[in-house]
Amino acid sequence: MIRVATAGEDGPAAAGVERARGLLRRLVDHPLPWLLPTLAALAVFQLYPLFEAVRLSLTDEVLTATGTEFVGLQNYVDLFTSIGFRRMVVVTAVFAVSSIVLHTLFGLILALAIDYGVRRGLRGHLTTRVSVLLAWIVPGIIIGLIWKVMLVESQLGAINYLLGQVGVGPVPFRSNPALALVSTIVAGTWRGTAFAMIMIYGGLQRIPQRLYEAARVDGAGRWARFRHVTVPQLKPVLFVTVVLVTIYALNTFDLIFALTNGGPGRATEVFALFMYRKAFSEYALGEGAAVAVVLLGVNLLLTAVYLYAFDIGDEI
């Protein structure tokens, strides 16, 4: 009788242990417990600041005042009707479009050249990759200071010194509004090309060689192979590269801050620098947050445009 009672008591306990083990196995196999830390970090460091920025953009909050009032869309109306904002948008558009085209173009050329060198066993491809990557590793604020020293508008500046050797200069690289914008584009391209090169070079490595061999058998030349094999295979990588380069260009702050500080006047003032001045120079947190929300909207809009233009919905 005692043995039967014990067996009867152990039966439900064993079943409970098995159910607990089964539940534990399902939890371990389910992706949610593994994603929870990442989701929590995103909520704290991404979603909360986003909602807080949207909330601030609907108020007249000023860093030097204690009271805050809800003003609705007034900050956005003031921005879009501001001459300074419209001028800044034009400067940002010129800088961003030039950066996107030059980063992607030079990154593609460098990636193709390095890929060709690696496949042919040529010397110097490793040195080339390291040299290009050094520009990306160095922080943007340092790059801006380096170019600022190089572009000193006297014979003390490296570039003006070289130009002086051929009877040109000194050139007002930073005091002339047009040349100052060109200087920021060149400095940004010098730094950002490395990122595009890395992305595109990685994409080139995943293209099967049998496609090129089949194209050669069909009599396709180099240009035909590039157009009908390389470019279609690189479309997903080019999409990601262009999106990230666009975000980088639209959010560039450190390099321009160190190189020109938005000057002369406001000839090189871009979105991020405009937002910084609104929030931390004029202490208008509400208006600065409105600029940040507009910048986010521009990034999302351009990403949607790229997604439509590249037509890779089935590939990502």
Image (spheres, rainbow, N blue to C red):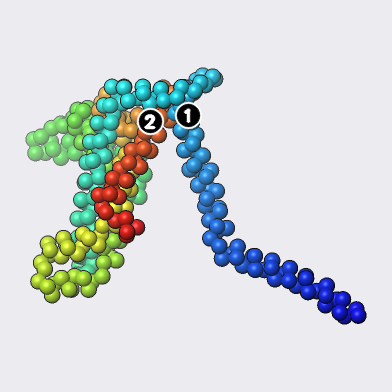
Left/right of residue 68 with respect to residue 148 in the rendered view: right
| Local SS, label 2 | helix
Residue 234 x/y as whole percent = 25, 59
Dot 2 alpha-carbon crowd within 10 angstroms: few under 14, some 14 to 19, many 20 or more: many
Residue occupying image coordinates x 28% and y 49%:
308
Label of residue 105 in the image: none
Left/right of residue 6 with respect to residue 28 in the rendered view: right
Query: What residue does disc 2 label?
Result: 291
Relative to residue 36, is residue 153 depicted above or below? above
Dot 1 alpha-carbon crowd within 10 angstroms: few under 14, some 14 to 19, many 20 or more: many
Q: Amino acid at mark 2?
A: Val
Label of residue 56 in the image: 1
Determine if residue 108 is in view. yes
| Local SS, label 1 | helix
Residue occupying image coordinates x 19% and y 30%:
178
Residue 207 x/y as whole percent = 26, 66
